[in-house]
Image: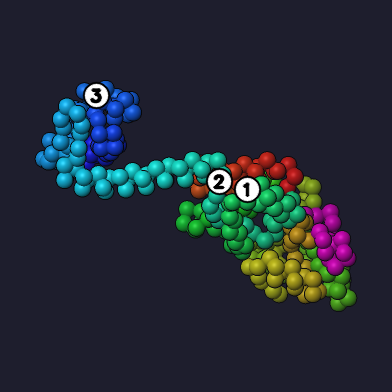
Amino acid sequence: MVQGFFTDIPLLVEVARQKSFTNAAETLGISVSTLSRRIKLLEERMGVLLFYRDTRSVEPTDNGAYLLDRCGFILEEARKAYDAAVGNMQNPSGLIRICMFRDIYGKPLKGALMDFATKWPDIQMEITIVEHPVDMRTDPYDVAFLIGPSIAPPLVARKLLTVEPFLYASPKLFERYPMPVEPNDLRQLPCIVLQRFGRRWPMQNGNRQVTVEVQPKYNFSSVEMCRDFILAGHGAALLHRELAEPDEKAGRLVRLLPDWSGGFAHDVNLVTGSSQLPRRVRLFVDHILSTRALL
């Protein structure tokens, strides 16, 4: 009964506005008989008379006026919501909550984020740097840039690029320790471990692979702390090339065992909670994917 009432509200309001079943029916695009029948059925379901009818005009009863006063407000709010939704389609706005590991935020992604902010100035971005993987099913993010293997449904992952860490240290470290020649020489160096890489480092050189279990002198969840300790000469560590590159070019870091990689090649995925996205989030995802070749 309530559901039928909601569908009849626009009919009720239009009859009251036009004070004529004929004019209201024309405006609503239905026949006069259909309109009259639906209003009559509404009155029967409610057990009250909503309109006084005569050959010249239609006027609401006291009950009808009471109902119209409140129904008019509902329709006005619905109209405002509709207009806002249409306006948002044309000029999207609102907040996008984003998270990422710090070492993903390199120059290409930085440029893509700046370009998005310029293109869609009414869309807000809340960007959180995380040190551990997040669960998009429970954590309050719309989009996440995650490093790792496969992403399980119902999450939707879009691969952006593959990253691989390499060994780095400060030249200061080799004022006290010999430069390593083979991966096993790492056992003779103080090592700094980024927790998500762990202490077992599968070093790879073409078809050769050696797993070195290091004894970390320092163990951090923060990539920023790891980098700071490397720069200070406190040990060697695995870092993604994009993060280490500025310091390497400036001579503050050197790449160790240059023929070997860290063996932790992982995909960087842009992850959302589902494929059904608000338009502002869809615009963001499409923008990042359109610049994927630059990342």
Give the mark, 1 or 2, whose residue is nearer the N terminus: 2
Residue at 15% across, 36% down: 52
Residue at 24% across, 24% down: 32
Q: What is the crowding at mark 3: few (fewer than 14 residues within 10 Å), some, or many (at least 20)? A: some
> Does the segment drawn in magenta span residue 54?
no
On residue 92, which mark appears?
Answer: 2
Asked which secondary structure carries label 3, the reply is helix
Left or right, residue 75 beside residue 165? left
Q: In this rendered view, identify the residue nearer to me: 138 or 149.
A: 138
- Position of the N terminus, as image quadrant, is top left
Above/below status of 191 relative to 16: below
Could one spot residue 12 in this view of the protein?
yes
The magenta region covers 245-261
Mark 1 near mark 2, Cβ–Cβ under 8 Å? yes
Distance from Cα at disc 3 to Cα at disc 1: 47 Å
On residue 120, which mark appears?
Answer: 1
Q: What is the crowding at mark 2: few (fewer than 14 residues within 10 Å), some, or many (at least 20)? A: some
Above/below status of 137 relative to 42: below
Mark 3 — residue? 32
Q: Position of residue 84 (x, y in %)?
A: 47, 45
Q: In this rendered view, identify the residue nearer to me: 93 or 189.
A: 93
Kind of residue indicated by mark 2: Pro
Kind of residue indicated by mark 3: Val
Q: How many marks?
A: 3
> Does the segment drawn in magenta span residue 260?
yes
Residue at 23% across, 39% down: 5
Residue at 68% across, 50% down: 118
